Every structure is written in C-alpha cells, then in structure tokens.
Amino acid sequence: MISYTQFNCTLSIFALLLAGCAPMPVNDHSAGLTTFVVLGEQGQAVARVLTDAAQCPRIRIDGVDVAMDVRAAAGTVAQRTTRSAPADSKPSGFPLLTCEKILPAQTTSAIVAGHALPLPKTEARRIVVIGDTGCRLKKSDQAYQPCNDAAHYPFARIAAAAARWQPDLVIHVGDYHYRENACPDDNAGCAGSSWGYGWDAWRDDFFKPAAPLLQAAPWVLVRGNHESCSRAGQGWWRMLDPRPLQAGRDCNDPANDDLGDFSDPYAVPLGGDAQVIVLDTSNTTGSPIAQDDVRSGKYRAMYRQADQLSQQASYNFGANHQPILGFYAYEDAKGIVNVLPGNQGIQSVFGALNPLIMPARIDALLSGHTHLWQQVSFASAHPTQFIAGFSGTMEDLVPLPDVLPSGATPAPGAIVASVSAWTGGFGYMTMERSGARQWQVRVWDTAGREVNRCQVEGSKSACEKARIQ
Ligand SMILES: [Fe+2]
C-alpha cells in the first residue's frame, strides 16, 4: 500500500524547478494503485494490486522484474438477486483490474511501482486481530451508521493505531462490507455514502480506511456472512480470497452460489510450530442445519479437513466468522436480557461429529460477527474463544450480565470458567507470543489505549478485567 505522504520526486530536475516536489496522492483509490499481500494455503503469500490502469504493473521480486497475472478484469457485473429488494440493489461496477502474483517462499523483497510490499516473517509473533469493519447502511433494519463521522465509524482510526503497533500479521475475522443500501437523502450522518456491492463501496468500507494496516503486514482474511454470494461475495472473490478465482465461484450468477459460498479450510503457519486454520462459515445460519441442507455435507467435510490440518502444528488457532463458543446478549420486547449460545448452525453439524464441537487440537477460536469484544474460557476441554467484531461496524449495545444466568453456556457440555466482555467500545485486539503455547492478548481502544489484558495458556485463557465499562 502506498502512503498518502509519499512525494513524487521522480520528476526531472528541470521539471522539479518548474513544478516543485508535489505530494502524489497515489492512495487515492479512485485513480491509483492499491497493493497488499494475502496469505493462503500453507501460508502461500500472494501479492495483489488493484489498479485502474489498462494493464497490470510489473512486480520486482528479489530484484527480478516479472509480470503480474490478471485475476479479474475491469467490468460491471449485471444486477443479481441479493439480500435486498431489487429496487435497493444495483449492478456491481468494478472499474479496475485485480492483479496478482504468487510470491515464492523466502522472498525477501517485493516491489510494485517503487513501493515495497509487506512480507511474512519467519515467525509471526505480533498479530493484530480485527473484525466487522464496514459502515452499516441497511434499509431493512433502518440502520444507517454515520459513515461520515469518525467518532461513529472509527475503522480508519483503528487501522492507523493497529499499524503503529507494528504487527507481523493481521487477521481479519470477517465482515468487511456493510454499505448495502443507499443512505436516505435527509440523513446527514451518512449522506453521500457509496452503496451496493461494487468497488466504490468496497473502497470506502475497506480499502481506504484499512490502507495503513494493509501496508504494515500481510493479512489472513476470514470470510464473513456479509461476503456471502447474495451480499458482497463478488468483491470477496475478485479482490480478497487468497485462492485462485475460478469460473462459477465468483458469485456473479446466483445459480452457482453453492459453488461460491463454500471453500475448503486451509492452514497458515505462524512459525514456531503454530498455525491458524481458516474456516469459511460465511453461509451458515443461526439455527441448526438440517441433514439434507447443502451446508450439512459441506461443514462435515470442513470439520474433517480442519481436524486433519490441526495435526500439522502443536498450537492451533481456528479462525471463522461466527462465534461457535461465544455468548450473545439479546434484550427482548419485555426488556429481559437473554444470553444466547454460540452459532447453532455450525454447532449442529460439528457437534454431531464430536460432542466437544471442535477438533481436539484446536486451542483457540478467533471470530467476529457479534459487534463487541469477548473472551470465554472453559473448564471443559473446549478451546478458548475470542470475539473481535468491534473494529468499526455499529456496535451491539446489550452488555452481557455481570453474573451469567445459572448454567449459561455457549454449547451443550461446555463448562464456562471465565468470561470477559466489552460491549459498546470500538477497538482492536493484539496477540503476542510469549511461549510455545502461550500468548498475551491485549485489547485496545480507537486511540491505541490498552483497556484489557489476557493470558492464553494452551486452550485456556484468563483476563485481568471481567467487564470493561
Ligand atoms: Fe457477521
């Protein structure tokens, strides 16, 4: 990613005398170049470039100039059925090329247009975790987040603060895109916001605010339900998913959604015998999945593959979007706060294969989806769960009760040992490795101030504060 503050000093001396050394707004996403690095299967690093030029730029890898491949051509995709009414949907315009190049392992430098890309470290010891970062514009819920007000939509501040922490790796736990419908004309908080599933909304919801953090480190990208085919799946496949873009998986034709909505899990090594296993649960439901539902077979296969991948390392994070072992507080019409369990769709399929829900070697779960920060640790043999869905999207407002109802648990048989929660605060989470199976987790607000600290020891964790006010 190219810095806004970079100066265009490539002019000739003569031209400089005439024109001066002018700022070059190369991160102006309407007319520029966006570069980033995503990590995929077995940690394979892929350089990505989004450009409105007619051709992909060349990339210099360890001193050798090579061509980049076209991942997706510029174009406008015809309007398809979406989660919104046809009148609130539109064609998806992507007036830019997506270019990519697989970076060989051990690459020490990769440069595009004079700008160095962030490369994976041998060991990722400093990891930023963020999630649910877009600005919510949703007509059916009459939810219009003030996208124009950084106090109410602080993803740019969070990305900048997280970049200053100098991570080795960033994990986004899903839901990048929230600008689904038009902001009403009389709503000053979001007036003029881009909307729909094309580039302009992706630019404003993700690539522009995320710029400093995309420049800071390579990313592991988890797919959220907002990136399912009937929502922002087109942009997900075109620009973010680390795997090859295959015909029929691009979410452009609803007839192929069963191809585009599911992906095999993969593992990204973190070095030091640890890894993160990435699960695409974007198309799950919140209720149990029937055996004849396509998701049942897909998620059974996912469980088995994740189990197999987990044999590769001594420490395993599982990263998926919907919390499988977290709590969600919901206030009903009578004002009574109900404490709801983890995702019932995944639990229904995984739980039929293993009463403990997750493969035994998965130590910790990283998720988002609920718009808060949360930690749960268990006395039973379940992995600890962290939720980091608090990085920009309009927050959930019902806090977990200080004392959980008797017997409250995210899943049958899971015995809760400790819970820590922050409801109503925006921020980001970091994880620093402190031992073979130990991590220090810290929680930060939008200004980069620490608000909580937890220790992870294997599959257990404990935090200093149970509730953050
Ligand atoms: Fe979500």
Image (cartoon, grey):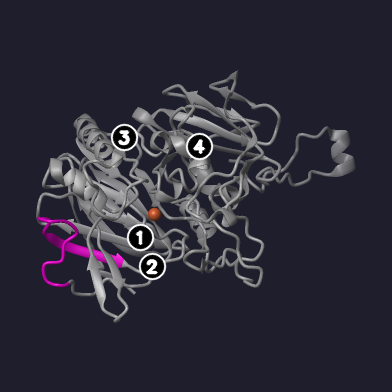
Please say if the residues under marks 1 and 2 sit with CB atoms less than 8 Å apart: yes
Quadrant for the N terminus in the image? top right
User: Which numbered circle lies on residue 403?
Assistant: none
Q: Main secondary structure of the magenta part?
A: loop
Badge nearest the viewer, 2 or 4: 4
Based on the picture, tell me whether residue 39 belongs to the magenta stretch.
no
Give the side of residue 459 with respect to residue 75, left or right: left
- The amino acid type of the residue labelled 2 equals Asp
Report which residue position mark 1 lands on: 370
Indicate the quadrant where residue 405 lies.
Answer: bottom left
The numbered mark, 2 or 3, whose residue comes first in the sequence reads 3
Is label 1 within 8 A of ligand 1 (CB to nearest ligand atom)? yes
Report which residue position mark 2 lands on: 396
Dot 1 alpha-carbon crowd within 10 angstroms: few under 14, some 14 to 19, many 20 or more: many
- The amino acid type of the residue labelled 3 equals Pro
Q: Position of residue 325 (x, y in %)?
A: 22, 54
Dot 2 alpha-carbon crowd within 10 angstroms: few under 14, some 14 to 19, many 20 or more: some
Mark pair 3, 4: CA separation: 23 Å
Dot 3 alpha-carbon crowd within 10 angstroms: few under 14, some 14 to 19, many 20 or more: many
Q: Which residues are magenta?
A: 405-421
Indicate the quadrant where residue 94 lies.
Answer: top right
Q: Residue at x 33, y 73 (%)?
A: 398
The numbered mark, 2 or 4, whose residue comes first in the sequence reads 4
- The amino acid type of the residue labelled 4 equals Asp
